Image: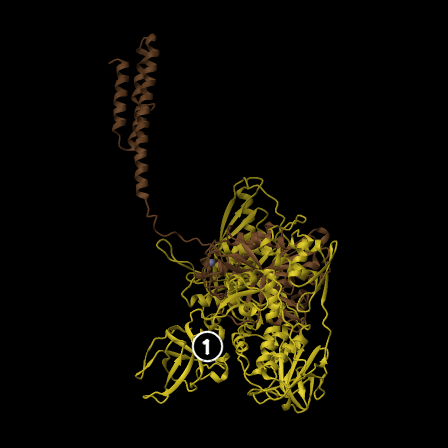
Chain colours: A brown, B yellow
Amino acid sequence: MSLNDTLKNLRENGIDEAKRAERLQELNDLRVNLLGKKGPITKALRGMKDVPAEERPEIGTLANNVKKDIQEAIEEKMSELNKKLVAKKLEEEKIDVTLPATKQTQGTRHILNQTIEDIEQFFIGLGYEVAGGYEVEEDHYNFERLNIPKDHPARDMQDTFYLSDELLMRTQTSAQEGRDMEAHDFSKGPLKMISPGVVYRRDDDDATHSHQFHQIEGLVVDKNISMADLKGTLDALCRHVFGPDREIRFRPSYFPFTEPSVEVDVSCFNCGGEGCRICKYTGWIEVLGAGLTHPNVLKMSGIDPNEYSGMAFGLGPERFAMLKYGVTDIRDFYLNDVRFLEQFKGVN
Amino acid sequence: MKISVNWLKEYIPVTHTVEEMADKISLTGIESGPVSLGEKLSGLVVGHITSVKPHPDSDHLKVCMVDVGESEDIQIVCGAPNAAADQYVIVALHGAHLPDGTKIKRGKLRGQESNGMICGLDEVGVPEKYMPEEFENGIYVFDEPQKPGVAVYDLLGLKDQMIDIDITPNRADTLGMRGAAWEIGATYDEKPVFKKPELDATKVKDMNDVTVDVEEKDLVPDYLIRELKDITVGKSPLWMQRRLWNQDIRPVNSVIDAANYVMIEYGQPIQAYDLDKLQDKKLVVKFAKDGDKFKIADEEKTLTHDDLIIASGNEIVGLAGVDNGSIAAVDENTKNVLLESGVFNSTSVRKTAQRHDLRGDDSTRFEKGVDNGAVDEALVRATQLVDESSNASEISNVITGNLTKAEPTIIKGKISHINHLMGLQLTTDEIVKILDRLGFTVDVSDDDIVVTIPTRRWDMAIEADLVEEVNRIYGYENLPNTLPAGMETRGGYSAKREFSNKLRNVLLGEGLDEVINYSLLSKQEVEDFNVIKTEYTKLLHPMTEDHEYLRNSLIPGLVRNIAYNQARKNDDLGIFEQARIFDRPTGQDRPNEVEYISGAVSGNVLNASWNTEDKAADFYYVKGIVDELLSFTNADAKFEYEATDEYDNMHPGQTAKILANGQVIGFVGKLHPNYQSDHSVADTFVFELNIDMMFDLNSKNVQAQSAPKYPSISRDLAILVEKDIENGQIVTDIFENGGKYLQDVKIFDVYQGKNIKPNHKSLGYHLEFLNPNDTLTDDEVEKAFSLVKNSLIQKFNVEIR
Ligand SMILES: [Zn+2]
């Protein structure tokens, strides 16, 4: 048999064997056996010396092609077997994805803090500083500086926990106004601040009353503050909190430390103003009190009311959260049943 | 107060429904709601009882023949004891509807036909406590003949339309019909018209038989009296009675009703005294003496020297501005009467009324203020009304105890400033017109205005008040929405708030739920965790013993939350709170307010499931949370844990103080088993950290370093050491002797018990060496490792295993 034929035979047998292989090992063995240094092709090529010189290149090319073809056949088969193996493995690894997860927990921010922080972020965006304030406050700041002198009837409206004649648990975050106005350097621009925190009233705890609750006081003092600024600011706030389609309205009211004073209603987010149980069939829900800072309050902080004006507003995070999420008992916020707390995961 | 539309119509035209009016008044002035009386009433007419026969089969029923304006009288069986022939009464015809939902049907009562019902006032909608006493147990009988068959609603005010106004304390000017007419008139641009009251000039005389002495002139700026002689006290006219009972005031007699009527009409309380019951024909307005007794209906009040009284001789006939007692009360036999109209200091009235639990229509008005410009006219009006119904023979001129000239308030303002505060550009004309609607007169000179405010609007004092009046009447709905347009400001949190927010986020990330607790605790609770050893801060007048002291730790609140949850089978809990505690140094009144962050973990931190086993919370789990928290403080400080047994309610063997640079900043540990069982909580691990102290630590100055490029070499070390030697001591010593390439020491094994010497434990450590700049050699590491071992042997007598 000519060398030529021998090589062609080897190719035929090699490809055939590769195709018949069923395991990767067989193919590896085949590669070593056929194509290795001790394999039949190498061996056959030793007969090259008997081939006439002019035919040698042709034989050489043939030999290389034979190797290449066998190689390809082996690789092709290998890839085929590999695919089958992977498919089998994947099939074996299939799991029931409906089994429950391995629990990973993040805690839930308290819904009141979520509500407060949502409002804080809104005002920070408008350039307001978030101020702190004291929970134990002097009568002077909690009342007198807010235009509520000792015998003022407004002191009856908010029964107070006193610690001594002069010290009390603050009844309103407005108590911070005097301190903030005193501390502010108006040559550096307007005072724009909100002051969130806990306040206290001598109330019996029930579904709608709590001896401790939160407030957020807002105060802006500058040369050109107007009722329209107050309305625009609170309108934007209510849209932020209660939805972009909300409107607000002002109703005249009375607070000793603002003049004019208004109650602010937001159009009912439940019925859109048609009237429902939540808005007591009025289409409007009272959400906060506001007004222009009373000139006496400015004066007591050394600010000239002819040059400056201020706007102030106070809102209750408990009330906001109760309205927004349908909480019906204010005590739920302070009982801290984790099933109550965790339902507010990520709402804000 | 309820504003009757029928009454209001005497002063201004009314063309809107009460619903529309209440809405509009709410938006421009005073919160209001519509009231429509008797909406369901029907079939009620005047009846004339033409005859009454006893019922043949009943000893209390009567068979009445009643003329109801039809061709024939109808028969009605009636059980009222006061029913009698020739009475004009309320008849509910067959098919009539009563307010309680009853529908009247013709039928038989004990065999006698009854074609309707003769009604009492309470049955047709006048509450029993506001109807005249004489009709309380029977049917209502008209004082005067009425036309049979005519509907009774207007006669009795049963279907009156009203606007119920809920005033803010500054708008007491609307606690009278006339003030309300001004307010509602301004809303609708209608000026009210009032008739001036006049007395019968032929009866008016100067009289000198009664004198008045006001001792406290500062507190009683106005005190006027008029005397009416030889009156006949009877019933007041029906029109007055129906207005009173619709104001929730019970008609009593022609004098008291007139006084009450004027209070509603003018907002000015009027008192009446029976002149013949006065001990002395002199009224003195003065302070009571402590212990003085004041008689009212069936009660006696003990007064204090802060109570203003009206005295006659040594008797107290009135508590000024609050109540006129029973000694000189006007009754049906009164012949000569004194009417009093005055102004009493609001604070004094408020305190007296509160002190003696006597707040009422009078004191409410004096507390909030009355129009001192109307004191005189209101007295004339009351005198006129008493005279009209009770027919005096003589009327005195006004007898003055004190009188302060009522001056209008003058407010100066600038059109530009008013506009600027509103954020509007109204013309001078527009502003003047609005002020005119309110009955204010305005002098304009360029930008300046001088506004004269009548005495009835005593709430008005400064330019800002004008801003409110103009803005509300102009309409808040017409305000544009703008934002403050001043200099740019940079908003944000304080650095400390940012810091505490960061710590809260770490704990949320660790899976703890955030809670908010009350700051006021019980005495027991502040004693339980006085870890900071502060003086307690107590409320002067607490509401309950549960909330009496300011908290000195957040732990009692967290324990309460754990107990509350575990009682509801929420067994596995991780919670934290960031809030203030109150730390009061000895000798200081005011407590310092310190920000704290505290947490509690109880039950399992991992629950068994189909692929996991459960893991209970333990000290080290919570310590891990604290470690992570401390690492996020970014503080350049050395944090350490130091075992402590000094906190009463903490486990003495599982509690550590947390130190930063040697200063205690908090603690972590397990609650004492006794405390746990007292509070019904499972094993609970808590921590508490002082945020203010952590915030004050210096921050790390972080300079980036590349991750090491050379491999590290490690050595494991197993030692046998006495049980009481702490891991912390060993680790510190390893670091001290491990050389500069020692990067990390990890403990991987702690074992005591079987196969270990008594009182000893076996510890396994993994030491990691690394030279960031070069490849370490085994020799270098071996050298350092021997130094470590030798030191441990010397210092702690350890056995290397
Ligand atoms: Zn609604």
Q: Which quarter of the figure is the N terminus of chain A placed in?
A: top left
- Which x, y percent locates residue B301? 60, 86
Q: Which of B484 and B210 lies nearest the eye of the viewer?
A: B210
- Which x, y percent locates residue B95? 36, 72
The quadrant where residue B71 appears:
bottom left
Q: Does A58 sit above or below residue B533?
A: above
Left or right, B791 with respect to B43, comes to right
- Which x, y percent locates residue A48? 32, 13
The quadrant where residue B637 appears:
bottom right
Q: Residue at x 57, y 74 (%)?
A: B542
Q: Does B142 sit above or below residue A239?
A: below
- Which x, y percent locates residue B377? 66, 75
Q: Quick check: can you spot residue B473?
A: yes
Q: Which of B187 and B316 lies nearest the eye of the viewer?
A: B187
Q: Residue flagged by tag 1: what amino acid is it?
A: Lys
Left or right, A105 with respect to B541, comes to left
Q: Does A26 sit above or below residue B299?
A: above
Q: Label 1: chain?
A: B
Tell me the residue that label 1 is attached to: B147
